[in-house]
Image (spheres, grey):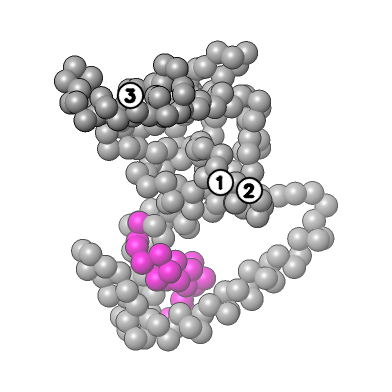
Amino acid sequence: MAGPGLAEMNAFVAIVEQRSFAKAAVQLGVSASTLSECLRKLEERLAVRLIERTTRSVAPTEAGERLLTRLRPVLEDYEAALESINDFRDKPCGQGHGRPNTPHDLLSRNCIRLRMPSVGLLPWRFAQNGKPFEVAVDGALVVNDLPFALRAARDGLGLLQTHSNRVESFIAQGELETVLDDWAPPRVNGFFLYYPCRRHTHAPLQALVDFLRKAAKVKGARVA
């Protein structure tokens, strides 16, 4: 019987590190069912259970912990060996589709979408000559958690639109880079308040709105 393959080992490590089949699948760029099948084959070949999974948690068994401890340095050496030959290439190589030159180029790119409970999928907004517009981007990954979306972007799974202050540290460290800077929508200063209906504004809320407008000295502060 053939021994476990590298794909199965990578699947096992990703599942343990992410403590989630779904998150590990996103990290590796495969489906959760494919990842589950890789783990099943690995456990069958080794004849030992490596991961305990329930509806609420995913955790390594004692055997899984021991295997992970031995595997990590092996996989790190494997990746380092591949990186060591980069200097011999005469041109860059890799995936994903080149840098987009205009927002409409995003229609052929994989974009990471954010879905918020109250507003649904967040639109991607841009501006040209001071005029704002939206682009209906698409992608294989839709999430409702910004930290998870940032992790996916850092892992190279797609493009992400978010506020610059949320990614400044990642850009400074070289983990992310910006695109379409000339198309960025103008920054809006001031307070934004969101509430279900403006017809029945309760007195405490109205007092807060009036106070913020006065304190910030912003005329026509936007309340949506």
Which amino acid, mark 3? Asp
Q: Nearer the viewer, residue 109 or 123?
A: 123
- Which residue corresponds to mark 3? 210
Q: Which of the two labelled residues, at mark 2 and mark 3, occupies the earlier sequence position?
A: 2
Q: Label 1 neighbourhood size at 10 Å, few (<14), some (14-19), many (20+)?
A: some
Frontmost of labels 2 and 3 is 3
**Magenta highlight on residue 2:** yes
Q: Secondary structure at mark 2?
A: helix
Which amino acid, mark 2? Ile
Q: Is residue 194 visible?
A: no
**Magenta highlight on residue 209:** no
Does the residue at mark 2 contact the one at mark 1 (Cβ under 8 Å)? yes
For the residues labelled 3 and 1, the Cα–Cα distance comes to 33 Å
Which amino acid, mark 1? Val
Is 186 left or right of 98, judged from the image as shown? left
What range is drawn magenta here?
A: 1-22
Q: Quadrant of the C terminus?
A: top left
Q: Secondary structure at mark 3?
A: helix
Does the residue at mark 2 contact the one at mark 3 (Cβ under 8 Å)? no
- Which residue corresponds to mark 2? 171
**Residue shown at the point (55%, 42%) measured from the top left:** 165
Q: Secondary structure at mark 1?
A: loop
Tell me: residue 145, above or below residue 12.
Answer: above
Which SS does the magenta portion mostly show?
A: helix
In the rendered image, residue 149, in percent from the top left (x then y), is placed at: 45, 47
In the rendered image, residue 145, in percent from the top left (x then y), is placed at: 37, 47
Q: Label 3 neighbourhood size at 10 Å, few (<14), some (14-19), many (20+)?
A: few
